[in-house]
Image (tube, grey):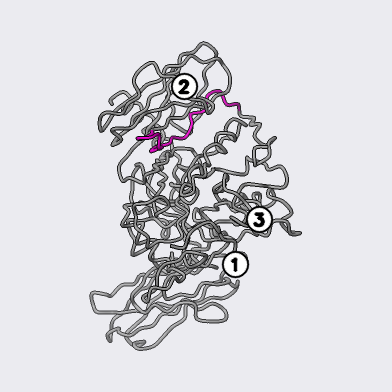
């Protein structure tokens, strides 16, 4: 397993515009929503008192190509003290036995409901196993089993019964997109004080204490983390656990979010001859991909950590770049210049942050601790599909200090257009463009605007002096392609907040594929 060796073990206008913009976004997305898919199979039957203290099997057929079987179980007669137990048999073995304590089961290749075994989903005849520990004489109970099949490991393809949002409604949601556990090289002290592989629980527990809304557990090339995540999610019902992986190659590390499907990481092998092959494989699985810590060194000091593809990379195959990495920050290694260079090359990549935490039990107040930095995403709800959709849209900013309440909201107006950071704006030569920034809980900071990576001189003050303050930037378009971003820095120029760009006059035909991934 590749490991980073240098890590030690130890405001009214702006608010109104923003509300109008997001109201429009939510209205459009709501109009596009479709009813939840019906179950693939519905099994119904009746059991009677004469079957007390016995078992029955209810068969159904799993089609070839299935990667997940999910079922719900309900029955009548509970008011008469009827109790039915639930299990699941595949063609070879018992896959689940939960007794009477669960009415929802899912069995996938890499994860399963507690009481169930993950693994290959063999096609053919399966059986719901129903036990009857108690049903009174002369009582009948009607049972209903709804069965759903998933043909991919993408979270978006899971049935709605597995994908209910932890919180409904649009909001800014705060999270950490880069974390490691015992399933790769995460460590913590044992009871006797020895450093040992750290259970997934401690990462989730620290994130909950930090007040985060979501985390992605991204162990190196591993999928074993998904099973403990499936177990922990019902307990952490305020903290969304997004399935992820850090695809670790000798030419760069890539976060791979939103699916548990396998992607071959053996770059340079016959099956994965180059980075484009790997990225196309990830794209075919519906994964969100992000370059991790691209400014880091590579070689013995940090194996494969920098972004050094041997051949040209089609950057359209990537969604994001880790503009701020907690591990890099500890060593003063900047990643923002790489992001800026890709933007200047015409590559529309969302800037995100991740702590890259390997020590979940360390104090939550330092660089690289869980939630430092925090990626703050505007999403329609707190669910994996919604959070990833917000990142894809660029509706995100980075809170480098990992606070619970700072906001950085950027909008732009030109003619009848109102757009948000991450969006496209069309402005012909001579048209006035007004950029608006709202920043909260950042008194003592200083605002900077950047155009194409260069600071824009402001005609008005840039000091943040109140808890909720707005700033504006007026610009007259020259008709050419540009990107604008806002930042807030604290004392000594230390960056606090970093927005995603607004893209002005970006044509649909994007030239970024003509550049090396390293920017050379």
Distance of mark 3 from mark 1, alpha carbons?
A: 38 Å
Number of the front mark, 3 or 1 = 3
Q: Which residues are drawn in magenta?
A: 489-507
Residue receiving disc 1: 63
Relative vertical location of residue 350 with respect to residue 182 in this rendering, above or below: above
Do residues under tags 3 and 1 come within 8 Å of each other at their CB atoms?
no
What's the residue at 54%, 26% (across, down)?
A: 452
Q: Dot 1: within a 10 Å radius of its alpha carbon, few (fewer than 14), some, or many (20 or more) residues? A: some
Residue receiving disc 3: 250
Q: Position of residue 313 (x, y in %)?
A: 68, 43
Q: Nearer the viewer, residue 403 or 328?
A: 328
Q: Position of residue 412 (x, y in %)?
A: 43, 24
Residue receiving disc 2: 456
Q: Position of residue 180 (x, y in %)?
A: 48, 60
Question: Which quadrant holds residue 25?
Answer: top left
Q: Quadrant of the N terminus?
A: bottom right
């Amino acid at each position: 397993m590749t490991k980073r060796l240098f890590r030690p073990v130890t405001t009214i206008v702006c608010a109104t515009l923003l509300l109008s913009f997001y109201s429009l976004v939510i209205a459009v997305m709501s109009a596009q929503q479709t009813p939840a898919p019906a179950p693939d199979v519905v099994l119904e039957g009746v059991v009677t008192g004469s079957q007390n203290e016995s078992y029955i099997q209810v068969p159904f057929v799993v089609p070839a190509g299935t990667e997940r079987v999910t079922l719900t179980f309900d029955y009548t007669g509970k008011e008469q003290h009827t109790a039915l137990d639930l299990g699941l048999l595949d063609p070879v073995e018992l896959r689940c036995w939960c007794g009477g304590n669960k009415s929802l089961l899912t069995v996938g290749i890499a994860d399963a409901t507690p009481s169930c075994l993950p693994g290959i989903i063999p096609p053919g005849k399966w059986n719901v196993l129903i036990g009857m520990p108690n049903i009174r004489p002369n009582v009948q109970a009607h049972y209903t089993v709804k069965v759903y099949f998933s043909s991919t490991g993408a979270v978006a393809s899971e049935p709605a019964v597995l994908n209910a949002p932890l919180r409904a409604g649009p909001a800014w949601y705060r999270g950490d997109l880069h974390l490691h556990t015992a399933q790769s090289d995460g460590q913590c002290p044992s009871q006797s004080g020895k450093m040992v592989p750290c259970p997934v629980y401690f990462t989730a527990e620290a994130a909950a204490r930090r007040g985060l809304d979501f985390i992605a557990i991204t162990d190196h090339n591993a999928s074993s983390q998904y099973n403990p995540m499936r177990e922990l999610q019902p307990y952490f019902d305020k903290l969304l656990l997004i399935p992820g992986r850090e695809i670790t190659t000798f030419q760069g590390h890539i976060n791979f979010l939103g699916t548990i499907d396998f992607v071959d990481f053996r770059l340079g092998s016959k099956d994965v001859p180059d980075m484009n092959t790997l990225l196309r494989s990830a794209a075919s699985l519906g994964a969100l991909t992000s370059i991790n810590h691209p400014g880091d060194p590579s070689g013995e000091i940090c194996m494969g950590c920098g972004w050094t593809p041997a051949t040209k990379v089609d950057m359209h195959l990537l969604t994001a770049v880790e503009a701020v990495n907690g591990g890099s920050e500890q060593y003063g290694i900047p990643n923002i210049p790489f992001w800026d260079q890709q933007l200047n090359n015409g590559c529309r990549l969302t800037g995100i942050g991740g702590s890259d935490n390997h020590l979940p039990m360390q104090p939550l107040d330092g660089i690289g601790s869980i939630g430092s930095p925090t990626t703050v995403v505007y999403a329609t709800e707190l669910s994996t599909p919604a959070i990833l959709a917000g990142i894809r849209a660029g509706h995100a900013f980075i809170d480098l200090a990992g606070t619970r309440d700072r906001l950085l909201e950027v909008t732009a107006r030109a003619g009848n257009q109102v757009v948000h950071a991450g969006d496209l704006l069309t402005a012909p030569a001579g048209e006035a463009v007004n950029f608006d920034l709202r920043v909260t809980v950042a008194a003592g900071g200083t605002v900077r605007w950047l155009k194409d990576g260069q600071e824009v001189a402001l005609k008005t003050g840039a000091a943040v002096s109140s808890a909720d303050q707005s700033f504006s930037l007026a610009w007259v378009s020259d008709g050419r392609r540009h990107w604008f971003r806002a930042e807030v820095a604290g004392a000594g120029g230390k960056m606090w907040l970093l927005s995603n760009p607004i893209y002005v006059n970006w044509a649909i035909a994007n030239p970024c594929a003509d550049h090396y991934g390293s920017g050379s």
